[in-house]
């Protein structure tokens, strides 16, 4: 069951969200990408506390292609250190999980 994951990626705005979402879907690195708007982020950066407005992408994909997804997103992301973190899906609707599996190009990145 733990072959599926949810990946979180923060982005600077709508334009970047669209670019990354389309890239992941077009290249079958994600079955689905949800965009959550109006995220307030507070974080340490270069020795000081920063605050910014961001968007959060919530991506459903397979664990076996995570490294490829990270590599590809880093190429097109505007941040020098983008947040790309993954959590395992420990259970869920089997039909939905099967849909994730069938929506991602098998063999291309595994």
Image (cartoon, rainbow, N blue to C red):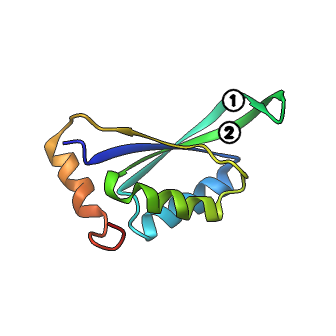
Residue in the picture at 34% in, 44% down: 5
Q: How far is disc 2 from disc 1 in space, using C-alphas?
A: 7 Å
Residue in the picture at 25% in, 34% down: 90
Q: Which mark is residue 41?
A: 1
Residue in the picture at 45% in, 63% down: 68
Residue in the picture at 25% in, 48% down: 3
Give the tally of numbered discs: 2
Q: Nearer the viewer, residue 4 or 110?
A: 110
Q: Which mark is residue 16?
A: none
Q: Nearer the viewer, residue 80 or 39?
A: 80
Percent coordinates x, y for residue 44 in the rendering: 76, 29
Horizontally, residue 107 falls left or right of residue 15, namely left
Image height of 94 relative to 53, above or below: below
Q: Secondary structure at mark 2?
A: strand
Q: Secondary structure at mark 1?
A: strand
Q: Quadrant of the N terminus?
A: top left
Q: Quadrant of the C terminus?
A: bottom left
Percent coordinates x, y for residue 56 in the rendering: 57, 40
Is the Cβ of the residue at disc 2 closer than 8 Å to that at disc 1? yes
Image height of 10 relative to 80, above or below: above
Badge 1 local density, few (<14 within 10 Å), some, or many (20+)?
few
Percent coordinates x, y for residue 71 in the rendering: 54, 62
Q: Nearer the viewer, residue 14 or 4?
A: 4
Horizontally, residue 38 falls left or right of residue 92, namely right
Percent coordinates x, y for residue 20 in the rendering: 57, 59
Q: Which residue is mark 2?
A: 54
């Amino acid at each position: 069951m733990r072959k599926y994951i949810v990946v979180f990626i923060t982005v600077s705005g709508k334009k970047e969200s669209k670019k990354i979402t389309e890239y992941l879907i077009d290249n079958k690195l994600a079955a689905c990408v949800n965009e959550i708007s109006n995220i307030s982020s507070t974080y340490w950066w270069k020795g000081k506390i920063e605050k910014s407005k961001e968007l959060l992408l919530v991506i459903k994909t397979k664990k076996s292609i995570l490294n490829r997804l990270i590599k590809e997103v880093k190429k097109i992301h505007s941040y020098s250190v983008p947040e790309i973190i993954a959590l395992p899906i420990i259970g869920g609707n089997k039909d939905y999980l099967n849909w994730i599996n069938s929506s991602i190009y098998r063999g291309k990145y595994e």
